[in-house]
Image (tube, rainbow, N blue to C red):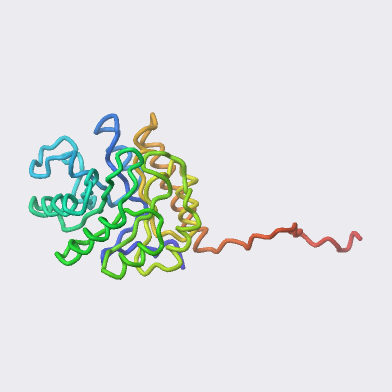
Amino acid sequence: MSINNDALVIAGRTFNSRLLAGTGKFSSNAAMVAAMEHSGCEIVTVALRRVDIDNPEDSILSHIDRSKYLLLPNTSGARDAEEAVRLARLSRAAGCEPWVKLEVTPDPYYLLPDPIETLKAAEILVKEGFTVLPYINADPVLAKRLQEIGTATVMPLGAPIGTNRGIRTRDQIAIIIEQAIVPVVVDAGLGAPSHAAEAMEMGADAVLVNTALAVTPNPGLMAAAFRKGVAAGREAYLAGLGEQRDRAEASSPLTGFLG
């Protein structure tokens, strides 16, 4: 497959970028906008708890060009399914498209997603017509259950949110990718462009990055680096990585006309 016609399709909608960006933690709205622009992203996620979705002059929303980016509200901070569903309904009532990044994180210390409450909320929101992108631990069984009820993606974490530790759940994510019937978006913990490249080399369909862009002194430059990392990883996946071996194998013949 050529990289030129290798689009990401989520719920029937086509995107040219496989890098999704978050909008939290930036030192200024200008820094956030620079990261969005240099990342080449087309989907940006916004925490519903941080914005006044009814107010077009909100300090964050007013800086996001909705004609250029799909605004993906997230339910960050929701402690259970009921709270997550309520937040999603509020965003739709305020005129947002019925897309939601579902996050249910009852543990304030590690911010790990609750699998039971996530599945419960996803079932409700899918039935109500939402396009649901659930943030989950790297649990292949849960990923299958979510796909079976109709979520648009699954979004397994590489490491806990904001840790920048890279893909610590590699084996589980590999199983999720192998069994996936919807796009797999690796989310959380990706702290360097090489982490994004690794996810894409594994066969992930996309990655979502926030903290790594927001905490650097130069968000625009870091976003550009992540953009290249995603593209490089995807190209390597499409090209096909060489088989790993336990023993050395010469790349050139050991015998020839010199002896």
Does residue 94 lie above or below 15 as drawn?
A: above
Note whether 79 is above or below 254 in the view shown. above
Please tell me in which quadrant of the rendered image residue 6 appears.
Answer: bottom left
Q: Position of residue 48 (x, y in %)?
A: 18, 44
In-image side of 156 versus 51 (left or right):
right
Q: Is residue 116 left or right of 226 when viewed as pictured? A: left
In the foreground, 206 or 182: 182
Q: Which residue occupies 31% across, 53% down?
A: 135
Instruction: Please give the name of the residue rendered at 37% of the width and 39% of the height, measured from the top-left corner.
Output: 162
The residue sitting at 39% across, 51% down in the picture is 157
Q: Nearer the viewer, residue 29 or 110?
A: 110
Residue 216 position, x and y percent, is 39, 32
Q: Position of residue 70 (x, y in %)?
A: 23, 53
The total of numbered circles placed on residues is 0
Return the x and y of residue 168 as percentages of the image width and height: 48, 48
| Identity of the residue furthest to the right in this view | 259
Q: Is residue 135 left or right of residue 235?
A: left
Pick whichever, 144 or 12, lies toward us: 144
Please state, as top left, top right, bottom left or bottom right, where the C terminus lies in the image. Answer: bottom right
Residue placed most toward the observer, 129 or 26: 129
Indicate whether 162 appears above or below 96.
above
Which quadrant of the structure image shows residue 148?
bottom left
Residue at (32, 67) in percent of width and height: 145
